[in-house]
Amino acid sequence: MPSVKAARPLEIFDKIVWQRLTHVSGARGIWLMTHAWLMVAIILGGTALLWQWHWFAGLIISPIAILAVGARQLGLSILMHEAAHGLLHPNRKINNFMGQWLTGASTGSDLHAYRSYHLTHHRFTQQEEDPDLSLSAPFPTSKASMQRKIIRDLTGQTFFKQRSHQFARAWQGFKAILRCDSHQEDSPRDTSAGRALNNSARAGIGAVETTINGSIITAQTVARFLVVQLAVLIISLMTLGIIPFLIWIIALATSFQMVLRIRNIAEHACTAVGSDDPFSHARTTYANWFERMFIAPYWVNYHCEHHLFMGVPCYHLPKAHMHLLANGYGEKMTTAHGYREVMRSITKAPA
């Protein structure tokens, strides 16, 4: 199937407006990354101090802290996504370092592998070739099914399943590194999954090398992930004890998984599949302050705009939205008035 049709920005915005919308600010990107970690530090530190003041106060506030930290971990993932598009910093090396080590590593993501995967998603959004189609295809679903998914997230089952698979693949990569089996020059990082499989089909040995290189990349990803977790642990123990680290890791295993799921659902679930209209592939969700704090940090709710104009940094997406409305494109867009509305719409039984 051909790529989805792209929006033509200069038919919507004048040239000066478009230049402003696509301007990438290095200072703004660094501030957003700093803000994400600063918010994590404030939440973790404040919770630990409450535990020191009185255990009951710490116990009461901890569930809220876990939800808030999970949302900030989602924020770090969103900023890694910005780096995948080259929008976190205008200097490519700085952009990639921030995306790889300062944001993506905290949640166990590899910037380069994600970039290849994600750009394929943009190219074939809601088409058969879309690697993210499986995330939206099950919807709408029943309330009972959605509740089971949320329970799996909040009890750590989703985290354990994902990390078990990732760590098992990483172990194969570590063994390959020790055997000096790496073929990094042939790494499939910058190719789509489909292209890698096609190459493997044409050459049997290519399948083996692709598997080895994929395992090595996963091993490197897990190593960065563990380095960040160790850094959080050391800082926690050197300052306020074990409580900050426990809140961080529990959030990563529970609330982060839940808000990541809600974000994925809100972006594409129950939008048009196979449509050639670029305004129909993704949803923009109007978020109040509470939702921005706990579900949709860093303007991730403006997802229709992001798919229309993926060269626009996240901090300019609200402006792009306002220009679209002013130019009469509001009715063409898929929108929702809050995440509660999204959840209601995706738990309706299909007609």
Image (spheres, rainbow, N blue to C red):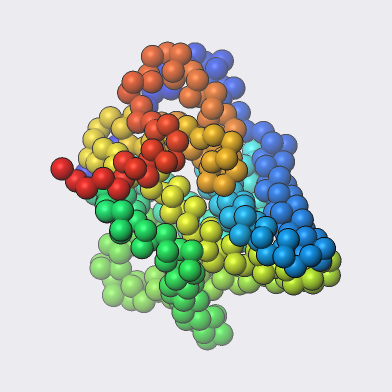
Q: Position of residue 1 (x, y in %)?
A: 21, 44
The answer to whether one can see residue 26 in this image is: no
Q: Position of residue 93 (x, y in %)?
A: 65, 49
Q: Is residue 308 left or right of residue 296?
A: left
Depth check: 60 or 99 in front? 60
Q: Residue at x 56, y 71 (%)?
A: 222
Q: Is residue 91 left or right of residue 53?
A: left
Q: Position of residue 117 (x, y in %)?
A: 41, 54
Q: Quadrant of residue 288?
A: top right
Q: Residue at x 32, y 37 (%)?
A: 281
Q: Position of residue 214 (x, y in %)?
A: 44, 69
Task: Using the image, determine if residue 281 lies above or below residue 146.
Answer: above
Q: Residue at x 46, y 79 (%)?
A: 168
The answer to whether one can see residue 256 in this image is: yes
Quadrant location of the C terminus? top left
What is the tally of numbered marks visible in this picture? 0
The single residue placed furthest to the front in the displayed view is 56
Depth check: 350 or 143 in front? 143
The single residue placed furthest to the left in the displayed view is 351
Task: Using the image, determine if residue 115 lies above or below residue 328.
Answer: below
Q: Residue at x 69, y 36 (%)?
A: 28
